[in-house]
Image (tube, rainbow, N blue to C red):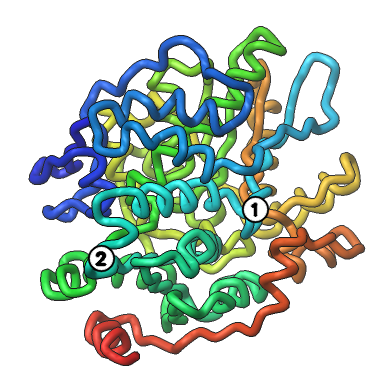
Amino acid sequence: MRCVSTRGGDERSLTEAIAAGLARDGGLFMPAMPLPRAAGRPAGAALAATAQWLLGPYFEGEVLESKLGALCEAAFTFDAPVRWLPSPADRLDGLLELFHGPTAAFKDFGARFLAETLSRSPWGEGQREGRTVLVATSGDTGAAVAAAFHRRPGFRVIILYPDGRVSTRQAHQLGAFGDNVRTFRVSGTFDDCQRLAKEAFADDVLRNTLHLTSANSISLGRLLPQMAYYAHASLRLADEKKSSVSFVIPTGNLGNAFACLMARAMGLPIDRVVLATNANRVLPDFLRSGQYTPAASIATLANAMDVGAPSNLERLRAMFANAASAVDADWVDDETIRATIRRTWSEAGVALCPHTACGVEVLRRVRAQGGKGTWLAAATAHPAKFDSIVEPLIGQKVEVPPALAELLRRPSRAEPLEPTLDALRSALARP
């Protein structure tokens, strides 16, 4: 599979593009268009089998082609179940629960696949010089990447997160690994962290000295496997309900939602895709006006979506001449997030994280506007990660998943960092 930069100045094989992370010209790698069509059916009922079937055309002819089955079996060890919500008899509304992995967020799927891919590639385990995985996080990505690469020979991880702009439990997770993982709390926003990571990749000395690779959603190694759970759910529901399914996807940097759009472009039975953002409404405004105006990010209850300059918009614009014809979007303010968490608990007995609440609220609006068919909102993180927000709204404790509880028992440490490339250079030069 040939992969090309969204800016046209770099072309590589899929394995090379995954290892590089960001293209030399600063663009994001995309599989050469048109995307392959999904043919036949998965060879098994498990999510790992769907992933192998879906990703097969991308790995055809690649150095890792013969290892794809093992990659998927190692990465997709937990499910993405559907939980149905109470709804009128003529409707099917549900949650696609993506938080059953080791760090209780959807990022676990892509991070684990990326770690397995890089470890088994020619640049993986046993290499003479280790690779550095640099990741900017608005809350969940960093912990998922740290868990996936923790104590993995040949790799070290550098996490950049915005100090004071993630939940208390997210911050604890991010600093709870140690060993080959270093965590920095950056004085700024997620956009500052993302900018800093991109500047590091653009710096030839840093990139070549540290052998940098990315684990943000700019990486195809993160993006491609995220198609699998949308494909898996859509195939199951097409068989059970005899109809295609539509998705509402909470999003900040647009990676998770773009993966769903790619799955649909491959021919999966997916109907509409609607984005749900918080008050950082750059994406809804772009789709309505056609004008992209990045903005300083706003701190909200749904902090992992506090993104004012979503990187994957570059992929969206590269794939669709008219993005508004392919996807819709709406945004939700903090007070409505609170109201949705209360209402969903009262009506369904289901606790939602603030990000999932954005999706459920936008789904409610879609139905009010006459949306038909089967709809799933992506439940992107476990509500226990946001206990200080969710528990006062529902009036009781949220049970903490065992894997998250284990992380919260560990000591946690994050180093302070100013949002400049010079400060990052200096920090990385220290042991």
Q: Does 135 appear above or below 21?
A: below
| Residue drawn 30% across the image and 62% down it | 126
Residue 67: horizontal and vertical position, in percent?
A: 38, 37
The residue indicated by pointer 2 is: 212
- From what the image shows, is residue 7 above or below residue 84? below
Residue 384, percent from left and from top = 75, 62
Q: Amino acid at mark 2?
A: Leu
Q: Residue at x 28, y 37 (%)?
A: 317
Pair 2/1: label in front:
2
Q: Are marks 2 and 1 in contact (CB under 8 Å)?
A: no
Give the image location of residue 348, x and y in percent: 87, 40
Residue 297: tell me if it is visible: no
Identify residue type, mark 1.
Ala
Residue depicted at 76% across the width and 48% down the height: 340
Residue 300 shows in this picture: yes
Few, some or many residues within 10 Å of mark 2 (<14, 14–19, 20+):
many
Q: Quadrant of the C terminus?
A: bottom left
Of the numbered discs in the image, which one, if any, rests on residue 381?
A: 1
> Local crowd at mark 1 within 10 Å, few (<14), some, or many (≥20)?
many
SS of the residue at dot 1?
loop
